[in-house]
Amino acid sequence: MNVSFEKVPGPIVRPLAPAFGAEVRGVDLRALDETGFEAIQAALNRYSVIVLPDQELSPPDQINFTKRLGPLHPKFFNPQTSVPGFVELSVLSNMKVDGRPIGDADAGRFWHSDMAFKKIPDIYSLLYALEVPVRDGEVLGDTLFASTAAAYDGLPAAMKKRISGLTAIHSIMTTFGKRKQVSEEKRQELPDVEHPVVRTHPITGRKCIYVSEGHTASIVGMPEDESRELLKLLHEHTIQPQYMYRHKWRVGDLLIWDNCATLHRAEHDYGDIPRRMHRGGVLGSVPV
């Protein structure tokens, strides 16, 4: 694919993959004026996943920038893995201090959209790389993305008609509950929710496939075997190579992604090699 730098006010935007994804250079998020911020917003709406490399962000810096995108959504599940002193950010890491984990080492093993098992999911996630695992010169721990908007556009007309108006049950127990103990109190706090199978993006108006292997339990009103088969078909369609972007991390990367327009999955191929990142979330709206 031929790519070229696209000059926008302040930042320089470079597409990274055919369907979506872009690198945004020429900005320091600690001193970002309104023109630069609007250019970043425009790039995020257009490309769904953007990386801003070479940032030097303290937790307050990351929080202040995240607030400009919308209301913060503190990580709910394990407050013990928050950045010390900053509940707005959570730590994703396999590292330990005095034998105790400093963060969540197991996040993102399955394709998912962040917080889809809540009535009001996150619209954006922001992940900042502090330590990146490397083995023999090769960067490990990539994050993979699939464009649910491009995947919907690529569906046959008959399939679009078939899934129009359907809803699905999303549950914290779909995969997370199978891997970790979830208390009855937490299950009561996070009951299953029902969302449309095809979601309309609240800003761009694009239609997006809104089911995933990580959080979607079943199609409402459909026999179990038919529901399972339809979810499998939609999943396999969405993660085809033409709808994919693989991010190879560098220290100082701030990656922002749109949880309506994409799914993502983390590679856990680095074992005990240190990896440490800070995650923030922006509260979205009820999917329609």
Image (spheres, rainbow, N blue to C red):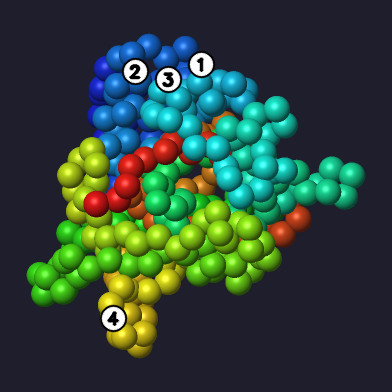
Task: Work out whether residue 163 or residue 247 is closer to the camera in this orientation and state it.
Answer: 163
Percent x, y of residue 31: 47, 12
Give the residue at mark 3. 27
In-image side of 42 versus 28 (left or right): left
Give the residue at mark 4. 222
Give the residue at mark 2. 36
Q: Residues within 10 Å of mark 2 (few under 14, many from 20)?
A: some
Residue 128 position (above or below residue 268): above
Q: Residue at x 31, y 73 (%)?
A: 220
Task: Work out whether residue 57 or residue 219 is closer to the camera in this orientation and state it.
Answer: 219
Give the residue at mark 1. 30
Could you give the CA–CA distance between mark 1 and mark 4, rounded to whole angstroms? 50 Å
Q: Nearer the viewer, mark 1 or mark 4?
A: 4
Task: Evaluate if marks 2 and 4 touch, with contact meaning CB atoms under 8 Å apart.
Answer: no
Q: Amino acid at mark 1?
A: Arg
> Which of marks 4 and 3 precedes in the sequence?
3
Q: Residues within 10 Å of mark 4 (few under 14, many from 20)?
A: some
Q: Residue at x 64, y 68 (%)?
A: 179
Residue 230 position (above or below residue 206): below
> Which of marks 1 and 2 precedes in the sequence?
1
